Every structure is written in structure tokens, then in C-alpha cells.
Image: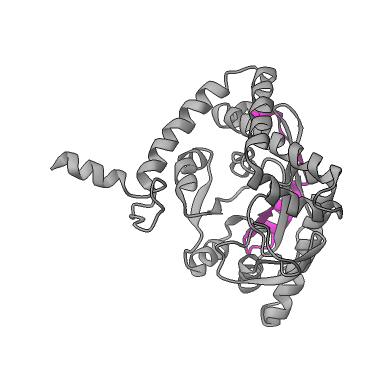
Amino acid sequence: MNARRRLAALRLAPDGRPRPHAPFGRGPLAARLLARVIDAAALAGSRLPAGVAHTLALAGGTAEWALRPRKRRRLAANLARAVELPVGSAEVRRLVREEIRNEARRSADLLWALGRRHAFLASVELEGIEHVHEALARGNGLILAGIHVGGWEVATAVPHAVVPVPTTAIVADDWLAWAIEHMRTTAGLRVLYRGEPMLTAARLLRAGEALLVLGDDGIGQPRGYPVPFVGGVAELPAGTVALARLCGTPIVSFYVLPLGPRRWRVLVDPPVEPPPRRSGEEGERRVLQALADRWTEVIRAHPEHWAAVYRIRWLDRPEPC
């Protein structure tokens, strides 16, 4: 009976609830096994010299680029917008290859940052952190809005180190998120799954805390707004601006960009004012457009670091396969 209970407990997600609709092989039990693999990889990867780790990462990234044509096609469809060139152009093909290699380098540095958190914090460069304090001083919490550029996961330990209030990351409710959750919580982040009631997030903001979200991926979000974004029109998630409007919370964009092997910089923008509470959808769209304009600027400056392998809801052209 005890063995049966232990096995049943292993089939629960980190929040203690089952996920009966998880895809086969990607449920809570598989996530627990993956978590052990991540722990072992972080232990080994964090002890490799930077040069060795990045040489291995480059080889692995090159192999992935060669073996995953579907990933190349999706990246090309999105990166072509960032540089306003045809999908089949030589420059877009180069960017696709570089981004996949950069993803491998990010993964190598992520293992190091997870295994040597204090070394990462001692080396990371921070620019614009005063904007976090400025936003929090208003007393309505803080929304930290990142995008899939550079090493957003590498910087997991940064909020606990520099944000003077508890920070909760809104994450996907899937096996990958469950597998890495213990790493996030060890680094000082709290976790809230997508799909949880908006009231839960609103309570955190009204308590003066911080929420961390990624704003350029609308898949799985209940609603969004179509806005001009990276050379097209995309439906971006509306939850961030809706929360800002309801709670009077400023939004601060941030970006985590590489400077070299195991060298990273976190850039923080000045706060974006929340939509007036009575402005409704019009105010939310206006603020979301202001964020999308800034995100577009950063993506165009660093297209080789935009991990746009997720499906973006482009409304001006058919979606990539």
C-alpha cells in the first residue's frame, strides 16, 4: 500500500494535483525523471571550463541545425520578419543557423548558472535596475515583461537578488516547466501556472509583489490583441496589460543578452504606465502596442538571439508549418 501511495504521489505535478490530460510520456512522472537528468547535467556542466562547454555546445547546436528541418523553417519564417528579407535569403539562413547555435550556448550557460548561482550573480552586468525600484515605489506591485531574446532562463536567480519583493513567474503548465520548477524555486522564484485565475495574479500585485511574464508568446493564452509587431501583425497576449490596468501596475520590460561565454547582461527599460482603469480594451491595446514597439526594436537589434521557435499567431500571413 505504501509503495502504491508513493507511486501515486510521483504522478502529481509540483502543485500536488494530477494532470490526466498530459500527453503520453510528458506527464508529471516523466517530469520528475527529467528533473533528475537536469540536476545531473547542471552538476556536470557547471564544472566544465567555459571553453570546453561552449565547444561542445557549438557542436551540438550545429548537429541540431542539420537534423531539424521543421525547426529551421519555423525560425526562418519568424526571423525573416525581423530583418525584412525573404525567408529563403542567405542572411535569414545564416540567422537561423546562428540562433540554433546560440540556443545551445545558452543551454550550456544555463547549466552553469543553475549549478554555480553565486558565480553567475557575481559576473552578470545589470543596467537599469533603478527602474524596478522606481516602479515598486508606486505601491501597486510590478510586472516584469520579458521576451524570448537571449538568456531569459539563464537569469533565473536575478529577480531574487535585485527585486526587493517576492517575484512570481507565470510559466507554462507542462512537463518541462514541472521538471525545472525546483530549480526556479531554489533560485528564489515563485511559480504560477498559465491558466490559473487572473484573480490569483491580481492578488499578488495588490500585495505589492512582482510578476514575471514573457509577452511575445500568445499560444495557450485565453485572449490577445492584434498589434503591429516585428514587420507584421501578431496576436499578442492581453493578460499582462489587463492586469496592469486592473491593478494600476507599471510594466517594466527586461532583456538578458550574452556578452561572451558565461558573461551576461540584464537590461531593464523605464516603466511603462498602466492603462487607465476606465480605458478598457482601447487602453490595453495602446499599452500593448507600446510594449510591442519596444520588443520589436530589441529583436531587430539582436535577431540572432530571438528564439522564435514557438508558433506566433501572425494575422497578416499564413502561419508557418
Tell me, yes or no, whether the highlighted magenta stretch contains residue 124: yes
Where on the picture, by quarter, is residue 215? Answer: bottom right
Q: Is residue 30 left or right of residue 293?
A: left
Tell me, yes or no, whether the highlighted magenta stretch contains residue 34: no
Residue 250 in percent (x, y) is at 70, 63
Q: Nearer the viewer, residue 50 or 170?
A: 50
Count numbered badges in the picture: 0
Residue 36 in percent (x, y) is at 42, 32
Q: Nearer the viewer, residue 265 or 22?
A: 22
* Residue drawn at (57%, 23%) of the image: 46
Q: Is residue 219 left or right of residue 197?
A: right
Report the magenta residues as a range. 120-147
* Residue drawn at (34%, 57%) of the image: 20
* Residue drawn at (58%, 60%) of the image: 208
Asked if one can make out residue 257 in the rendered structure from this viewpoint, the answer is no
Q: Nearer the viewer, residue 104 or 146?
A: 104
Residue 172 in percent (x, y) is at 52, 54
- Above or below residue 9? Residue 138 is below
* Residue drawn at (47%, 55%) of the image: 173
Q: Nearer the viewer, residue 189 or 284?
A: 284
Asked if one can make out residue 214 in the rendered structure from this viewpoint, the answer is yes
The furthest residue to the left:
1
Where on the picture, by quarter, is residue 218? Answer: bottom right
